[in-house]
Amino acid sequence: MVNNFKGPETAAVMDVDQFEQPLLLPLLPDLPLLQVFAYLSPQDLFAVGRTCLRLAALTRGAWRSTTAEVRLNTYAELGDLFRVAPPVELLELDVCVSSERPAHSLYGRFTIDRNTGIGSNEETKLILCVESSDMPKVASLLLELAPTVRRLDVCAELDEIFRILRQLPWSALEHLDVSGKYVDGDELVALGAPLWPQDVVLPMLRILGVERHNEYFHSTCSPEYLDALRSLLRAHSGQLRSVMLRLEALLPLVDACPRDLHHLRVDLLEGKGDVAVLRRLSGLKELSITMLSGYAVEEVDDKVENLLRTWSGPLERLELSSRCSFRTETARALGESGLKNSLQCLVLDDPDSLFINSESELKVALGAHPHLRTLVLLPSLSNEQGRPSEKRVVHELVRRSPQALHVACVRGPRVCQRPVRGRLTMMVYFRHSESERGGCPRCAEAVASARRYIADSSNWDVNYYDSVCMLPTLAVQFLQVQT
């Protein structure tokens, strides 16, 4: 006889098993899930977010700063990323038609960078790089993404760039960098690109950069290419504050910039451009000139020195960067310039040659600017102490300046005269008492001026398409100069 009797404990277990549901991941409360997500790699976080709507919503707030990437190979993955990741603020697009890729191929990668080392405030950058031969398909997916993008870096043929800008709602776009394709050797040509409609305006656009920084590439621009870019500049001339022309061949575009433009950056390589056209910007407040290491170094130096001597506008900030070395004549030109009544901030990138060969000329030149209150030096030497002559010159300048000059010297690891990832040290020299430092606006101004120059990715050659780099951390020291 089979005994079918079951005790009370066995019956209770059967009742629980009958009604108990399996514990699935989406059934967990938010807090435990977020704690689990903190241990996931970006690729795993992306995979979890694609499973259901609730997990997708949770993962949007779980991304953390990392150099790891999420690789994208299909348009479905790209569409899912927009629903899983936080709103994209920095978007980089590279439209590439290559015989090595299928007609509708896609390559993309996504990363997030929260950098607190250089910038004065914490900033979140979400970077999406897309390489595709089917831009209409990508544009359709970007439709819901575009309204959150604050900076757009796009490399494509100019007609494609204009189409992207006109078809999508870039309502928050403040910073635009455009780079054309070299379709005819080293010449930038606008193939079929119409002029930008003058009644179409990107409402928040304030910064426009043209061409990616490349100090070794000699390029020319066709008249059609310049005309198309000129039309884009003129349509936004009433709202632009900063323009960056990273090819010498782009200097003719200065005539399309507003005369009261706040900031202009130009890169000079061959010495063939008409640098004197910069004087047209009579209301310019900030000018950045990068003298690259081309074969025509003397021609570039001659034109820059002549520009400094003859400048008459109300320029308040001047940045000079030399990829070779500053000449003694450059120091003299600074002292003889027409900036004596307006210059308040001067940035010299790689000024070691001036300390070595032109110490007396440099002291005379800087002493000729009575309104100069901030001097930023970025020597190429990697050690923190620098050359003895540098410290002596800095102390003397601070002691003799009529405007309580503050000098910020930034040092750190460099490769081929360029800052690289690592730890930087900034030393701020001043002559007031140590007790006044906490409330001194010029101490804060010196630090902010140096941070601003360093954090500019164009000065650091941070190319998000090739590699995503975290900017270095910056340690600030304050040193009183005894009077």
Image (tube, rainbow, N blue to C red):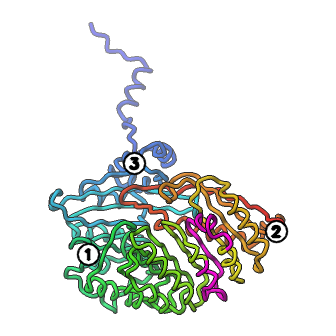
Query: Which residue position is annotated with label 2?
Result: 436
Q: Residue furthest top?
A: 1
| Range covered by the magenta-colored residues | 332-360
Q: Earlier in the sequence, mark 2 or mark 1?
A: 1
Distance between the alpha carbons at the discs numbered 2 and 1: 55 Å
Identify the residue under disc 1: 187
Q: Name the residue at 80% across, 69% down.
A: 431
Left or right of 269 on screen, residue 339: right
Judging from the image, what secondary structure is the residue with disc 1 in? strand
**In screen coordinates, is 138 left or right of 293?**
left
At mark 2, the secondary structure is helix
Q: Amino acid at mark 3?
A: Leu
- Is-magenta flag for residue 384? no
Q: Amino acid at mark 1?
A: Glu
Q: Which mark is residue 45?
A: 3
Q: Nearer the viewer, residue 289 or 262?
A: 289
Identity of the residue drawn at 50% across and 61% down: 124
**Picture coordinates of residue 312 (x, y %)?**
57, 92
The total of numbered circles placed on residues is 3
